[in-house]
Amino acid sequence: MRAGMNYGGKTNDSDPRLREDEPPFRPWSERWFVLTSDETSCSIRTTYEIKESLRHKTIVKPRINSQIIAQELRVVDETGANLGVLSREEALKLAKPELGIDLIEVVPGAKPPVAKLMSYDKYRYEAEKQFKKERLAQKTGGIKHVQISARAATNDLLIKVKQLEKFLAEGNQVEIQMRLRGREKYNRDWARQKLEAFLKMITVEYKRLSDPKPGGQGMFMQIAKK
C-alpha cells in the first residue's frame, strides 16, 4: 500500500489524490479531482479518469419512463410527429411499456427536454448501430497528408502516388502539400502546373475537394475517392 503524504512527520492517508488504483508517478497536474454527480449518486473522479472515459467513448443510456425527472417534455411519436409540450404526468400516460411503447428522453439538454415514444429495445438497437457506424468512420475516415517537393524526381513522385492511392483506397481524404522554396513561392502559375502534373500521375479515380491554394510553406489541395 502506498504511503500518504508527510506533513511534518504526520501522514495523510485520507488524501483523495492518493488512490491506490491510480498509476504511480503521475504528474500532479493530472491528479486534481472534481466532484461529479447524477440524480442517484455523486463521486470523486480525478481528471485522469475523466480523460480516460472520454477517450473510451461509450453509449450513454437515456432516462426512460419513470426515470425521467423533467416536469415538462416535448413529445414526439415514433414517426417523428410532434405531440407538443406535455407535463411529465401526461407524457407518462402515453407510454405503454407492456405493449413495447416507452417514453425515452432523447434530448435531455433541450428546453424543455425532448422525449420520444417508441420501443426502448428498438431505440437501443438503432443507437448501437449508429455508434458502430461512427466508430468505423473514425477508423477508416479522416484526412491523410502527402507531402511532395516541386522539384522532386519522377521516381520519388511515383512513391508518393502509391502512398496517396493507398490512403484513397482506405476511404481517407488526402491533402497534398507541395513544398516551395525561396522564389518558387512567388511563381504560383509554375507551382500550380507542377501540382497538376503530379495529379496526372494518379491512376485511380478521384474528385477534388478543393482547388490548389497557396499556404504555409507552399501550395496545397484536398482530394477524395469518387
Image: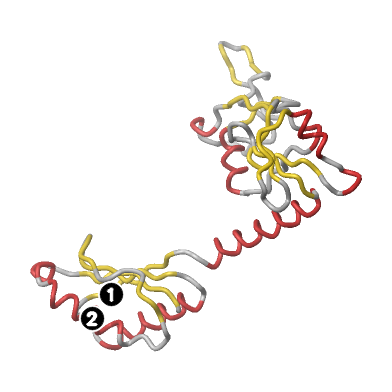
Tell me if label 2 and label 1 are in contact, CB under 8 Å: yes
The residue labelled by disc 2 is: 152
Q: CA distance from mark 2 to mark 1?
A: 7 Å
> What percent of the width, then of the height, locates residue 125?
75, 56
Q: Relative to 41, is 170 above or below?
A: below
Image quadrant where residue 94 sits? top right
State the residue in front, 147 or 14.
Answer: 147
Q: Judge by depth and name the residue closer to the eye, 38 or 48.
A: 38
Q: Secondary structure at mark 1?
A: strand
The kind of residue tagged 1 is: Ile
Binning the other alpha carbons within 10 Å of mark 1 as few (below 14), some (14 to 19) or many (20 upward) gives: many
Tell me: residue 153, above or below residue 108. Answer: below
Look at the numbered disc 2 and give the secondary structure of its residue: loop
Judge by depth and name the residue closer to the eye, 84 or 53: 84
Q: For mark 1, what is the residue?
A: 148
Residue in the image at 45% along x and 79% along y? 226
